[in-house]
């Protein structure tokens, strides 16, 4: 549908208000494929957010504006959402956070809707909010308005993942990812452009050599990977940059680490840093939006409290 030169132009991020004829052509095709799929399979009819032009554009960008490929990816995501019960999770998240999603609030009221969601935050802690003065959870943002998301995969304890159970862990992981996408949808609506995620992944304590893993560690890792396997195709084009920090200095470890942590199409957005990462990170995020462990001003949160307790 597009020449190589046109695709290069389309891939330049611009505000929605500046979309031109080429963007409209691509979106018109995606809308037609979306509506045709819903007619043929009514059970996969998309939610308001999933049907939006902004969400369609994320699939187009992910497939470099190969419109038929983007449409197939999108329809596959609709089918997965149906099979995994994602729309039910969405409904609970929207209801629990109505002020943010419908009233313009700057804070979330809840980061989950079930006890298993709270359990996940204990098993697999991550930071993307800070406590708001009047209650709730204020989102962390980088200097460009993207969502700031911090995690420490080396602190995931296999025994705790297994104890939560595959079904409960998977459902909680799906809830967490759906909330992340809903936040991006709402922030994009307010900003009039695709808002993305600046992800900071602290690689401290990540086991690089897998040969000595116990059976329990292997099973816990398998459950984590299986739960997140559909996300790259179901929630595309969410990454602004991935900062992998506290990487070891040993040569040759970078490529395997990238493959383990990020989708292949996001690898070019990865910034690899050792223990001296604050200068580069602070170019993207101000100290007032970062925990002290990252050279910021905020409380370190649950994930680093766990490290201090080890």
Image: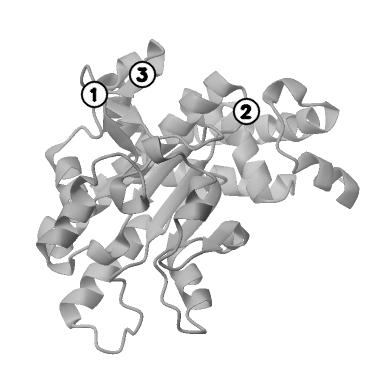
Snapshot quadrant of residue 159: bottom left
Residue 56, compared with residue 306, is above or below; it is: above
Kindly identify which numbered label has been placed on residue 61: none
Q: Position of residue 178 (x, y in %)?
A: 38, 38
Instruction: Provide the residue designation for mark 1.
Output: 136
Residue 147, compared with residue 121, is above or below; it is: above
Instruction: Provide the residue designation for mark 3.
Output: 100
Q: Image check: 118 left or right of 289? A: left
How crowded pointer 2 is (Cα within 10 Å; few <14, some 14-19, many 20+) is rated as: some
Circle 3: element type:
helix
Q: Position of residue 24 (x, y in %)?
A: 77, 28
Residue at position x 49%, y 43% from top? Answer: 197
Kindly identify which numbered label has been placed on residue 193: 2
- The colour scheme used to paint the residues is one colour
Q: Image check: 198 left or right of 173? A: right
Circle 1: element type:
loop
Q: Are marks 2 and 3 in contact (CB under 8 Å)?
A: no
Q: CA distance from mark 3 to mark 1?
A: 10 Å
């Amino acid at each position: 549908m597009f020449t190589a030169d046109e695709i290069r132009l389309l891939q330049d991020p611009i505000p929605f208000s500046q979309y031109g004829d080429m963007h409209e052509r691509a979106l018109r095709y995606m809308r037609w494929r979306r509506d045709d799929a819903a007619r043929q399979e009514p059970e996969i009819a998309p939610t308001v957010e999933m049907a939006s032009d902004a969400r369609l554009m994320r699939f187009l960008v992910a497939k470099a504006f190969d419109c038929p490929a983007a449409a197939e990816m999108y329809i596959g995501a609709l089918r997965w959402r149906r099979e995994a019960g994602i729309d039910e999770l969405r409904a609970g998240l929207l209801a629990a956070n109505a002020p943010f999603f419908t009233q313009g609030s700057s804070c979330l009221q809840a980061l989950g809707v079930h006890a298993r969601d709270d359990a996940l935050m204990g098993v697999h802690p991550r930071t993307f909010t800070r406590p708001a003065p009047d209650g709730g959870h204020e989102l962390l943002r980088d200097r460009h308005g993207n969502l700031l998301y911090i995690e420490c995969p080396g602190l995931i304890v296999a025994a705790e993942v297994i104890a939560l159970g595959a079904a409960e862990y998977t459902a909680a992981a799906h809830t967490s990812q759906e909330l992340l996408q809903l936040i991006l949808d709402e922030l994009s609506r307010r900003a009039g452009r695709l808002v993305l995620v600046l992800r900071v992944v602290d690689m401290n304590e990540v086991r690089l050599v897998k040969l000595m893993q116990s059976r329990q560690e292997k099973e816990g890792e398998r459950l984590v990977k299986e739960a997140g396997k559909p996300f790259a195709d179901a929630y595309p084009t969410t990454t602004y940059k991935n900062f992998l920090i506290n990487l070891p200095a040993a040569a040759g470890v970078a490529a395997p680490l990238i493959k383990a942590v990020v989708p292949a199409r996001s690898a070019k957005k990865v910034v690899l840093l050792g223990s001296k990462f604050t200068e580069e990170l602070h170019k993207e995020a101000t100290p007032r939006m970062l925990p002290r462990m990252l050279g910021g001003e905020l409380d370190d949160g649950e994930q680093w409290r766990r490290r201090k307790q080890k």
